[in-house]
Image (spheres, grey):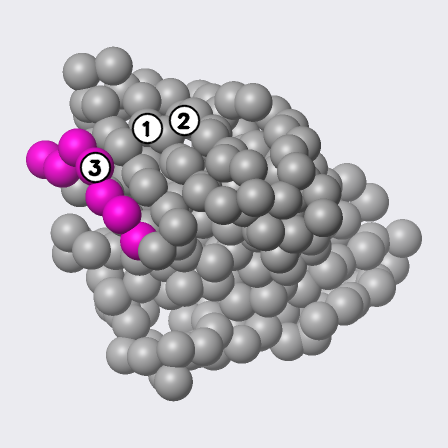
Amino acid sequence: SQQGEEDPQALSIQEGENATMNCSYKTSINNLQWYRQNSGRGLVHLILIRSNEREKHSGRLRVTLDTSKKSSSLLITASRAADTASYFCATDPNTGNQFYFGTGTSLTVIP
Amino acid sequence: DTEVTQTPKHLVMGMTNKKSLKCEQHMGHRAMYWYKQKAKKPPELMFVYSYEKLSINESVPSRFSPECPNSSLLNLHLHALQPEDSALYLCASSQDRTSGNNEQFFGPGTRLTVL
């Protein structure tokens, strides 16, 4: 399977703290994307980082990409209860024919 | 309009039934996807349509039959399903398969239960 791995599987933090989740993948990629999914709902696109980029910011989100290590991290700063969700990384490999989701991190932000 | 809609929201069917899931987008996207997602697992790709042609079938059993009547619509026809097919079925669309910015827009999903 070319599915990526995410860690931790589950993360519980207090509101206001930062949350970091990591994604490792297996193939070379065009880009890597992060998605959020609230329980039993559709996925929402958060941010896309291209293979030639190392860091990207969007509001309280910071994503890094290290293609030499085939890994990415998502940092959510100043977390809020509304950030409680599952977070998935997804890779778009150079083959251009597949789109692989990682195993996901379940984030709980305690008010 | 940046929305992908899916109907129905919930579906309960017997193993001998025939039903269809529908997906619609009006963003002018030329790639559309079906995913299956079991509880606490990531979405698994089932089918990809690119410019209304089936470009990827991830070895999905023939009891699932996709159809793309036009560039805005995607159907998934279901027949003789098994209880293990119970899952959340997600539809998504993106500009196309070859663009470097292929952010996928997801619908809310259809929660399918097979009795």
Given residues B92 and A64, the one toward you in this image is A64
- Determine whether label 2 and label 1 are within 8 Å by CB: yes
Count neighbours of disc 3 (C-alpha within 10 A) and say few if under 14, some if 14 to 19, many if 20 or more: some
Please provide the residue range marked out in magenta.
A52-58
Q: Earlier in the sequence, mark 2 or mark 3?
A: 2
To which chain does the residue with label 3 belong? A
Circle 3 sits in a helix, a strand or a loop, which is it?
Answer: strand
Q: Residue at x 62, y 63 (%)?
A: B109
To which chain does the residue with label 2 belong? A
Given residues B108 and A53, the one toward you in this image is A53
The mark lying in front, picked from 3 and 1, is 3
Relative to residue A25, is residue A67 drawn left or right?
left
Q: Amino acid at mark 1?
A: Ser
| On screen, residue B109 above or below A11 | below
Image x and y of residue B60, in percent: 53, 43
Badge 2 and badge 1 both on one subunit: yes
- Which corner quadrant of the image does residue B72 belong to? bottom left
The disc label shown at residue A23, or none = 2
Which residue carries the number 1 mark?
A72
Q: Earlier in the sequence, mark 2 or mark 1?
A: 2
Count neighbours of disc 1 (C-alpha within 10 A) and say few if under 14, some if 14 to 19, many if 20 or more: many
